[in-house]
Structure formats: structure tokens, C-alpha cells
Amino acid sequence: MQEKELEKDVRDEKLEGILILDRDKKGVLKGTYKALEIADSTAVSTIEQALSQAKIAVGTAELNVPQEKLSELFTPVKVNSVALKEGAKTEEELQKATGLVYVVLFVIYFSVLTYASMIATEVATEKSSRVMEILISSVPPVQQMFAKLFGVALLGLTQIAALFLVGYLSLQSSQEKGGDAADMIKGFLDISGVPTATLVYAAIFLMLGYFLYATLAAFLGSVVSRIEDVQQMISPMILLVVAGFVIAMVGLSTPDSTFITVTSFIPFFAPMIMFLRVGVLDIPFWEAALGIGITALTIVILAVIGARVYKGGVLMYTSGGGLKNIKQALRLSKDQ
């Protein structure tokens, strides 16, 4: 068919497009792609890649280059990384530690969002149904608050343990059937070469992250009277969690940067970012201890303030939320 006829088929939408191949005076292969619309660059990119490969194949054939030599020429160069600092993780240890960091970061992120939001919602639900008035007559509000924190923590540990158990059994079953994907996932999650200290830090920062945000969520939930207001009240807390998670994910590629180092000492980011540094870097013990201490101190401060807000907030039934309600809850707690 002639080029004009093919162009007519494209205009009649019988063809999506046509590709015209030609050689210039120097024998260099070139192409022209014609379509109704050329806004979609995906097709052009695909064609360019295919023509580039064809150009290489034709060129090597004309030069009588054996296919084996061509394959060797385009084989990527493997670069091995060697750490010279004493005590630094080897490449294999770093890969396993990175896998563990990924898992723990996601566990902290989802557990904080799920269980902290659950605590705030439960408190608001009890208030909206007036169950709180019955509870505070038999159990002090502060005792209720910490009982709720520990109860949800045990629930979360049980659920996470069950999920990991089911996942492990599924991987074992897939591996027995010869699944390549199962071997890849199991290799990624292999922690056999990860130092025991890193596993201990993982448990510590997971616990700190939960209690930090759960305490904050408990007293934020206590100053709202309707379930509909809970999300609005805890949205700043959720933004802090998301910001810490995003910084940690970005920091996986540059864990030794100044920005990551500084943010790892900010209490609301420390559970994720300090653990990132502990997991993939060989940092001094005092830095990890300082991060743990700052976070623990913040939890104590939030617990003291939160207990007072919770004590007054559970008796409040005003609409909306915000700083005004927190101040009012603090005034009510002083009168009790």
C-alpha cells in the first residue's frame, strides 16, 4: 500500500498509526511515526527503544560481531561495596537490615494509624453513647485511659503476630511447591544475619511509636463528643505519622544525610527515623539512647498532660474540637 493510503486508514481510524523506516545518506536508520494524535509519548518511546535495539543488531551483523561478544559487551558491570569503617555492616548484612527496616517501618506506620485512631474513636463512642458517665463512677478516668492504651496494645500485638504467622505459613507452603516468588520474599525477610541489637531496637521503637501516638490520640479523642469530629481532631496527628514515614522512606537511600540525622531526634519522628539510622548505619550508642530518651520523655509529658485532659474531657459534651476544648478540659480536671 502507498503511504497516502495508509495515512487515510489512520484518519478513518482503521489503524492507530504508521511507522515509516528509512536510511539517510550515511546509512543511519531513522523512523517517522504518524498518528491522529501524538500527545501520547508512550508509543514513540516504545518504537525508539525497539529501533535502537534493531540498529545495534543490524550494525553488529554488518561488522560480523559474534552474538556472544555482543552479550558480554552489554552485560551490566557489577560493583561490590566494601565498608572500611570498623564495625560497619557488610553488603549482605546491609541488605538484610534494610529488609527488616522496611518491615518495621510499615508495621509502625500502619499500627499507629490503625490503633491510635481506634483509641480516639472508642473514647468518642463511649462519650456519645453516655457510657462514659457510668464508667467514671466506678473507674477513675486516668485509669481508664491507661487501661485502654495497654488493652489496645495487647490487641495489636496479637493481630500482628497472627498476620506474621499466617504469612510465614503461606511462604512455607509456597516454597514447598517450588514458588520462585516465595524464595525471593523469604530471602528479603531473612534476618539470620541481622545483629541482635537491631532486633531489640526494632521492638523498642515499635513500642515507643505506639505509646507516643496512642497517648496523644486518647486525650484528643476525649475532647470531642461526636464520632464525626474524631477525624478532624486527630488529623494533625495523622499528618505527623505520614510525614515521619515519608521522611524515613526517602532516607533509606541517604540514611547518613544531615536532614535525616536532625529529624531522627524529633520525638514524633524518632521511632521511625532513628530506627532507620540504627538499622542501616553504625551510629554511636549515645545517639540511639538519646533518641529513645527524648521519645520516652515526650511520652511521659503527653501522659501527664493527656491524663489531665482526659480526666476533664470525658465529662465534656461540647460540639467540635480544637485547642479551646483542650483548655476547657484542663480547667474541668482541676475542679475535680
Image (tube, rainbow, N blue to C red):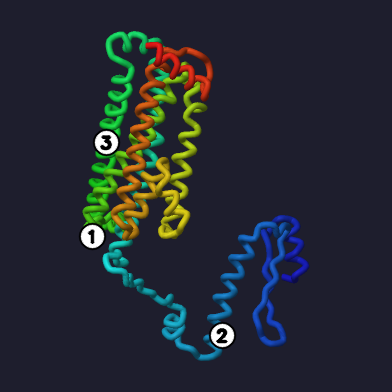
Tell me how far mark 3 sits from mark 2, CA to CA.
62 Å
In the rendered structure, the answer to whether residue 15 lies left or right of residue 292 reads right
- Is label 1 in a helix, a strand or a loop? loop
Q: Residue at x 32, y 54 (%)?
A: 278
Give the percent coordinates (x, y) of residue 328. Answer: 48, 17
Q: Which image quadrant: the C terminus?
A: top left
In the rendered structure, the answer to whether residue 189 lies left or right of residue 261 reads: left
**Which residue has dot 3 on it?**
157
Amino acid type shown at disc 3: Leu
Residue flagged by tag 2: what amino acid is it?
A: Gly
Dot 2: within a 10 Å radius of its alpha carbon, few (fewer than 14), some, or many (20 or more) residues?
few
Q: Residue at label 2?
A: 59
List the single residue furthest toward the bottom: 64
Task: Look at 30% across and 59% down and name the residue there.
Answer: 96
Q: Is residue 73 visible?
A: yes
Pointer 1 residue: 193
Q: Is residue 287 above or below residue 294?
A: below
Q: Are marks 3 and 1 in contact (CB under 8 Å)?
A: no
Instruction: Name the residue nearer the viewer: 36 or 240.
Output: 240
Task: Return the disc, 3 or 2, that comes first in the chain's sequence.
Answer: 2
Helix or strand or loop: what does disc 3 sit on? Answer: helix
Q: Earlier in the sequence, mark 3 or mark 1?
A: 3
In terms of sequence position, does the residue under pointer 2 or pointer 1 come before the other? 2
How far apart marks 3 and 1 lie (CA) works out to 24 Å
Q: CA distance from mark 2 to mark 1?
A: 48 Å
| Amino acid bearing label 1 | Gly
Q: Which mark is residue 296?
A: none
Task: Provide residue 117's location: percent of width, then percent of height.
Answer: 41, 30
